[in-house]
Amino acid sequence: MSTSTGSAEMRAVQYRRVGAAPEVVTVPRPEPGPGQVLLKVTAAGVCHSDIAVMSRPADAFPYPLPLTLGHEGAGTVAALGDGVTGLDIGDPVAVYGPWGCGQCLMCAQGKENYCLRAQELGIRPPGLGAPGAIAEYLLVDDARHLVPLGDLDPVAAVPLTDAGLTPYHAIKMSLPKLVPGSSAVVIGTGGLGHVAVQLLRALSPARVIALDVSDEKLELARRVGAHETVLSDADAADRVRALTDGVGAQVVLDFVGAPPTVATATACAAVEGDVTIVGIGGGSAAVGFGTIAFDAAVRAPYWGTRAELIEVLDLARAGAVDVHVETYSLDDAPLAYERLRAGRITGRAVILPGG
């Protein structure tokens, strides 16, 4: 039986017009249909991906407007649609964002981030096509997209659904190369990168070298465990090679993805190294004989799996990862986006719809 919340309204942060700033608006509160779950949002993350979406011109804008923002969400179960089992009203949960069809080959492996039919079926993540989490309530399409939070603080945990899961997925693919004596480079030590530094320290014996253009973010990288920090400029790759006795890094993770950082990333790679471009800054890697170290591999992954989100939350429970967060009220969410666009957020911005 469906548990109804009654007819009501809620406040949400929406991107309503191409080129305009996000707005706090009042919209109808959704009701869960069969199989769906309504959450009362306790915390929602702000991400550079949102800035990238809002920077697209009208002729290339991929989603219908208005769009409620926020693809990192945590909350408590407020209402259950018909047929939903295994959840109770009030349960604290985190939202697994890259929703898939649940039936294709990739989804059958729990890899809904690589769903083969999502585009065809019009399935989109919350905040990236579907109504997002920066609102008082969030409608989740299926209970399988919720992971129990238990006693984790939702404010500290919510960035882990992307800023934790995405670097974890990227690092996990390269763990076999992170042996004793190896080096890992993290380019961009903001929201995702400062988590990547912690994950590398928790999961591997590699020496972690962090690159950024901001002394403040390099200081954060040192604070969370980077062994070395390097200013990210045209000479950064040379300095990385000097730090690695000319060998280069076995694993390079670029959380910016702009043309200059991608060029730095490929120049840092050791023979048989992994270069993983996570950021969506529009850069592309030059790959070919003589342009990159021999047998180096270049990847461009997306988000992570449901199982990996559970693992990331377990790492947080063990105290292995701690996201630096700045909190904002729902009314101040547009300010958080303004600060993020200006590069003035250290770590991750989290919106608290309940105040």
Image: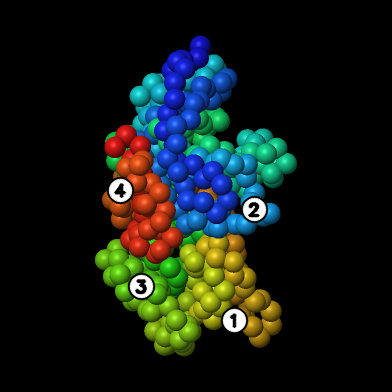
Q: Quadrant of residue 105?
A: top right
Q: Mark 3 or mark 1, which is nearer to you?
A: 3
Q: What residue type is labelled 3?
A: Ser
Determine whether 299 is above or below 319 in the image: below
Tell me if residue 297 can be seen: no
Quick one: label 2 or label 4, which is nearer the N terminus? 2
Neighbour tally class for label 4: few under 14, some 14-19, many 20 plus, Cα within 10 Å? some
**Residue at the image position 52 percent from the left and 22 percent from the top:** 32
Quick one: label 4 or label 3, which is nearer the N terminus? 3
State yes or no: discs 2 and 4 in contact (Cβ < 8 Å). Answer: no
Q: What residue type is labelled 1?
A: Ala
Tell me if residue 33 can be seen: yes
Residue situated in front as seen by the camera: 322 or 176: 322
State yes or no: discs 1 and 4 in contact (Cβ < 8 Å). Answer: no
- What residue sits right under mark 4 in the picture? 327
User: For the residue labelled by badge 3, is the local secondary structure a helix, a strand or a loop?
Assistant: loop
**Residue at the image position 35 percent from the left and 42 percent from the top:** 331
Q: What residue type is labelled 4?
A: Thr
